[in-house]
Image: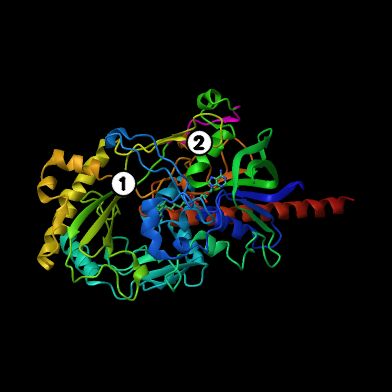
């Protein structure tokens, strides 16, 4: 690679945020974008295309498709360590995740708007989701759903299994929330439902950021933009740091085919590296000055907020015996993946209209597992670099259950929701019995606490380590993703989520990527107009 690489923009990472940015910026066929992705293009691999592998991917974290690593032992979870990973392949996390499509609710987006202004309002978010999605499902509110966008969303299955019907009926009876048709309708954010909305084509294949935004109508298999699109995508290429001229980002240094190389920008560098974005900022001299100095990195801008405020939802499971005659998946739809679900408020009755709990059923022949996500954790973690080696894993402390309030909330979910759902399920079909935790564990506070620790997991919903907020309010980037303290450097991905989202995180990452790409284009347009005006003015003067 001898030619100097110069583009209008460089995008690091092809997860939901990076992919939508790359496509949106190059739509005009004038703007040039270089995309650098550490992983390979595995879109054709059976485990990636075939949604039936989703659960296996989540359990096995295959080295071929995932970043390999663990976070630091979690003090409040008996020093257990948990995977610190995301997809390392085209599409990032969206190519290996559990496919659940959940938009953040208006309650959360109102917080975003109050802090950051109208570009993040619930109304604008709804309008952007409409543009992005191609909803293949039912709703009572078609005005808020999109049916022609690039991301295929399948509501599935058409005919729910008896297992899903029993579970959701039990949730309905146990909580008093009636079943809902479309949980992504901002008007119906709470209640049980039999049909999940999954990132899938109509035929049940996985829809990822790669298949939606970097597909054959956008680029060739070699990563070149088609139909005049000025796009270049390099895979197997790991960005090491951002290059600066004074305080202005001018390019990046990266490894490709084992060689250290540089690429430069005319406009901006955009980091969309997900859980690795904080590390990239720190390696580039933006972060807490003491940590950077200790690591031997020259400080470009001291910002103690970098890597702080990391959040993740908690995940636990309750296991029920099931009726052997009930099927886990419909015979005609093995890609349905889940046996019903629900979004519920805090079980103790505080904030009764706000989502705090996500439930999802996973069936097998003789059991029903109920996944329980607590969506409003108060605990915060942090990301620290160990030294100036870009390939050295960070010290990721997820801070699970650090705030004792979180343990109380998870216990309440078991004591109130799980116990009542178990009672209702048993009354609907006595073959459904709560096996784990057993009812006596739920009734014993100390044993329940231990069960929650032993059984603790997470759903890889890491967010907010580079919060989008004013500097004085713990921010790392402004409302348009511009990194505080330097110029021409943007972060756009799940790491900038300003307030914890109340559902899975990839929809928020798509929203962030798309919104920021649109803002960049808008600013470019304004600058262009200003330049034209100046030119006119100058020619009048001549
Ligand atoms: C196992 C699992 C299950 C999940 N289930 C769901 C689910 O069901 N629904 C849901 O909505 N969300 C789910 N998530 C979360 C969701 O996938 C992420 O929130 C989402 O992918 C984040 O998008 P992103 O664009 O911020 O970053 P990512 O998707 O993480 O993309 C970052 C990209 O940057 C690349 N990259 C990183 N560092 C570098 C570097 N230095 N140089 C070059 N490239 C780099 C990575 O390889 C990756 O491709 C799950 C995640 C995991 C891991």
Which residue is at a point 54% across and 27% down the rendered structure image?
Answer: 292
SS assignment at label 1: loop
Find residue 21 and report its image quarter.
bottom right
State the scheme by which the image is colored: rainbow
Residue 268 in the image: above or below residue 207: above
Q: Is residue 529 left or right of residue 422?
A: right
SS assignment at label 2: helix
Residue 497 on image: x %, y %: 45, 47
Closer to viewer: mark 1 or mark 2: 1
Residue 256 on image: x %, y %: 64, 46
Badge 1 or badge 2: first in the primary sequence: 1
What is the magenta range?
Answer: 298-308
Q: Is residue 538 left or right of residue 132?
A: right
Residue 225 on image: x %, y %: 67, 62
Pick the residue in front: 440 or 472: 440
Q: Judge whether residue 314 is colored magenta.
A: no
Q: Could you say which disc has been placed on residue 471 in the image?
A: 2
Q: Would residue 104 be visible to someone looking at this image?
A: no
Which residue is at a point 11% across and 42% down the rendered structure image?
Answer: 444
Q: Would residue 26 be visible to someone looking at this image?
A: yes
Q: Could you say which disc has been placed on residue 457 in the image?
A: 1
Counting every numbered tag in the picture gives: 2
């Amino acid at each position: 690679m001898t030619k100097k690489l110069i583009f209008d923009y460089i995008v690091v990472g092809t997860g939901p945020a990076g992919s939508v940015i790359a496509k949106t910026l190059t739509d005009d066929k004038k703007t040039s974008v270089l995309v650098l992705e550490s992983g390979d293009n595995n879109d054709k691999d059976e485990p990636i295309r075939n949604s039936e592998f989703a659960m296996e991917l989540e359990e096995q974290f295959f080295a071929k498709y995932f970043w390999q690593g663990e976070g630091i032992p979690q003090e409040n979870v008996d020093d257990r360590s948990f995977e610190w990973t995301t997809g390392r392949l085209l599409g990032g996390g969206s190519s290996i995740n559990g496919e659940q499509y959940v938009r953040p609710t208006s309650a959360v987006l109102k917080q975003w708007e109050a802090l950051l202004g109208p570009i993040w309002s619930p109304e604008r978010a709804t309008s952007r989701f409409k543009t992005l999605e191609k909803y293949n499902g039912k709703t009572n509110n078609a005005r808020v759903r999109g049916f022609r966008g690039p991301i295929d969303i399948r509501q599935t299955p058409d005919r729910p299994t008896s297992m899903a019907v029993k579970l959701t009926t039990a949730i309905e009876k146990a909580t008093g929330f009636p079943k809902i048709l479309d949980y992504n309708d901002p008007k119906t954010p709470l209640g049980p439902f039999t049909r999940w909305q999954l990132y899938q084509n109509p035929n049940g294949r996985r829809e990822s950021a790669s298949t939606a935004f970097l597909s054959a109508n956008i680029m060739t298999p070699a990563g070149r933009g088609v139909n005049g699109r000025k796009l270049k995508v390099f895979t197997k290429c790991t960005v090491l740091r951002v290059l600066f001229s004074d305080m202005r980002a001018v390019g990046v240094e990266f490894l490709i085919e084992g060689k250290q190389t540089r690429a430069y920008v005319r406009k901006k560098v955009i980091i969309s590296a997900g859980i690795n974005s904080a590390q990239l900022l720190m390696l580039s001299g933006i972060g807490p000055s003491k940590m950077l100095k200790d690591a031997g990195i020259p400080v470009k801008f001291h910002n103690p907020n970098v890597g702080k405020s990391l959040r993740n939802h908690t995940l636990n499971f309750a296991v029920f015996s099931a009726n052997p005659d009930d099927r886990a998946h419909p015979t005609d739809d093995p890609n349905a993946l889940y046996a019903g679900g629900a979004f519920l408020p805090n079980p103790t009755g505080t904030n009764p209209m706000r989502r705090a709990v996500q439930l999802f059923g996973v069936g097998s022949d003789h059991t029903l597992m109920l996944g329980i996500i607590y969506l409003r954790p108060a605990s915060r973690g942090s990301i620290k670099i160990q030294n100036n080696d870009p390939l050295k894993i960070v010290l990721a402390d997820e801070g699970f259950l650090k705030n004792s309030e979180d343990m109380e909330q998870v216990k309440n979910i078991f004591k109130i929701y799980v116990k009542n759902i178990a009672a209702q399920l048993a009354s609907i079909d006595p073959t459904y019995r709560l096996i784990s935790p057993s009812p006596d564990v739920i009734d014993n506070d100390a044993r329940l606490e231990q069960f929650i620790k032993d059984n603790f997991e997470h759903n890889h919903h890491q967010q907010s380590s580079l919060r989008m907020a004013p500097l004085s309010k713990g921010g790392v980037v402004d409302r348009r993703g511009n990194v505080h303290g330097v110029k021409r450097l943007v972060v756009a991905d799940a790491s900038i989520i300003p307030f914890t989202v109340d559902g899975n995180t990839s929809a928020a990452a798509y929203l962030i990527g798309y919104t920021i790409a649109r803002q960049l284009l808008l600013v470019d347009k304004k600058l262009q107009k200003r330049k034209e005006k100046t030119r006119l003015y100058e020619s009048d003067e001549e």
